[in-house]
Amino acid sequence: MRKASAVATRIDGDEGKLFDDLVLLAAHHEMFERDAEIARSLALPSGSVVRMEGKVMRDGREEFHDYLQIDAALEVGQASEVMAVWKAFEPDREYFRVVSTNAVVIVDPHNSRSVYCGRHDDTEIPIELDERPEPAWHQRLEALLKAS
């Protein structure tokens, strides 16, 4: 009982930091959940989807963005599925890029661009994205952030 009251006393004195730490933990967990969901949608092991960072050309200028590297070939339908899953996790994200062994897939809502580009030829195929709801826990987290 003494330990519980000591912990409660420490928490009572620093609710803001605790809340910030919980938000950071949720954001970190969200990335792993997103990557695992994408891997599941492709029937791949969870380690097959990795977050990377790098420079990309966008709107005629070089920008730094994070993107997903998938250790597998993607067909057009699979690319659309991957982007729909990712967009459900981050609906307000301004730029999505997936690099696979055979394609680069780009969704750029700002420029109304969603394309599948072959890495070994000049293939560029528009893709359609199914709208998916955000995960329920993500909706609750957003509500908590807005209330704080």
Image (spheres, rainbow, N blue to C red):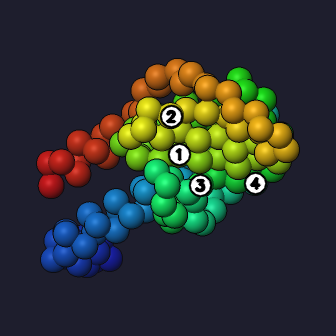
Which residue bears the numbered disc 1?
96
Please name whichever residue, 98 or 18, is drawn nearer the observer in this view of the structure: 98
Disc 1 to disc 2, C-alpha distance: 10 Å
Res 4 seen here: yes
Marks 2 and 3: in contact by CB < 8 Å?
Answer: no
- Residue 73 picture location, percent across and down: 83, 40
Callout 2: helix, strand or loop? Answer: strand
- Using a 10 Å C-alpha cutoff, classify the residue at mark 4 as few (fewer than 14 neighbours), some (14 to 19) or many (20 or more): few
Query: Marks 4/2: CA distance?
Result: 28 Å
The amino acid beneath tag 2 is Arg
The location of residue 103, given as percent across then percent down, is 76, 42
Q: Is residue 86 left or right of residue 142?
A: right
Give the residue at x 42% y 26%. 133
Q: Marks 1 and 2: CB-CB under 8 Å?
A: no
Work out whether mark 4 precedes mark 2 in sequence or the reverse, and give the earlier one: 4
Q: CA distance from mark 4 to mark 1?
A: 19 Å
Q: Is residue 130 found left or right of 72 in the rendered image?
A: left
Q: Assign a secondary structure to mark 1.
A: strand
Q: Return the disc, 3 or 2, that comes first in the chain's sequence.
A: 3
Residue 33 x, y percent position in the rendering: 57, 47
Tell me which label, 1 or 2, sits earlier in the chain. Answer: 1
Quarter of the image for residue 40 reads top right
Seen at 48% across and 41% down, the residue is 108
Q: Residues within 10 Å of mark 3 (few under 14, many from 20)?
A: some
Residues at discs 3 and 1 in contact (Cβ within 8 Å): yes
